[in-house]
Image (cartoon, grey):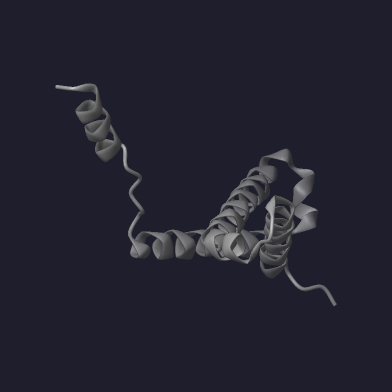
Amino acid sequence: MSTTEFEERLKAALKPVEPPEALALRLERTLVSLTELAADELEAWELSSMRDPRNWVRPVVATVIGAGAGTALVALRVRNGRRRRKDQSVDLLDLAERTVRDVADEARKLLPQRD
């Protein structure tokens, strides 16, 4: 086997594979569901019951799960728009600005609206 043939086979074997579209949609739905469940748990939380440290577990777990799922959801949505941002960008700095703006926009969508 020649070196070039070996390199070609290695390139073919290590070619990136895009996940199916249904997988991304299922993952996004799951993350949205986890975020909403954590928010509901925190809304049902009663401050008066926090005097007993045994009651701290549920709100802490809900906060960790909600923050983790929310962060993953923002990352997933921003990643899905990377090709569009890259095509619209003039240079690397413009791409970074667009990415940061998209991260902020997606995070705002997840945070509750305050009056």
Say which quadrant the C terminus sits in: bottom right
Please state, as top left, top right, bottom left or bottom right, where the N terminus lies in the image. Answer: top left
Q: Residue furthest left?
A: 1
Residue 47 quadrant: bottom right
**Spot occupied by residue 63 in the image (x, y as percentages of width and height):** 66, 50
**Considering depth in this image, is 87 or 50 the residue closer to the camera?**
87
The one nearer the camera, 48 or 75, is 75
Residue drawn where x is 72% and y is 56% of the image: 100
Where is residue 102 shown, x and y percent of the image? 68, 63
**The image quarter in which residue 101 lies:** bottom right
Quarter residue 52 falls in: top right
Apparent side of residue 77 relative to residue 100 in the rendered image (left or right): left
Q: Position of residue 61 (x, y in %)?
A: 61, 46
Give the residue furthest to the right: 115
Name the residue at 18% across, 22% down: 2
Residue in the image at 56% along x and 66% along y: 84
What is the total number of numbered labels drawn onto the structure image? Answer: 0
With 88 as the anchor, is 105 left or right in this view? Answer: right
The one nearer the camera, 6 or 72, is 6
Residue sitting farthest toward the bottom: 115
In the rendered structure, the answer to whether residue 14 lies left or right of residue 65 reads: left
Of 59 and 78, nearer the camera is 78
Looking at the image, is 90 positioned above or below residue 57? below
Estimate the x, y position of residue 77 in percent, counting from the top left. 56, 61
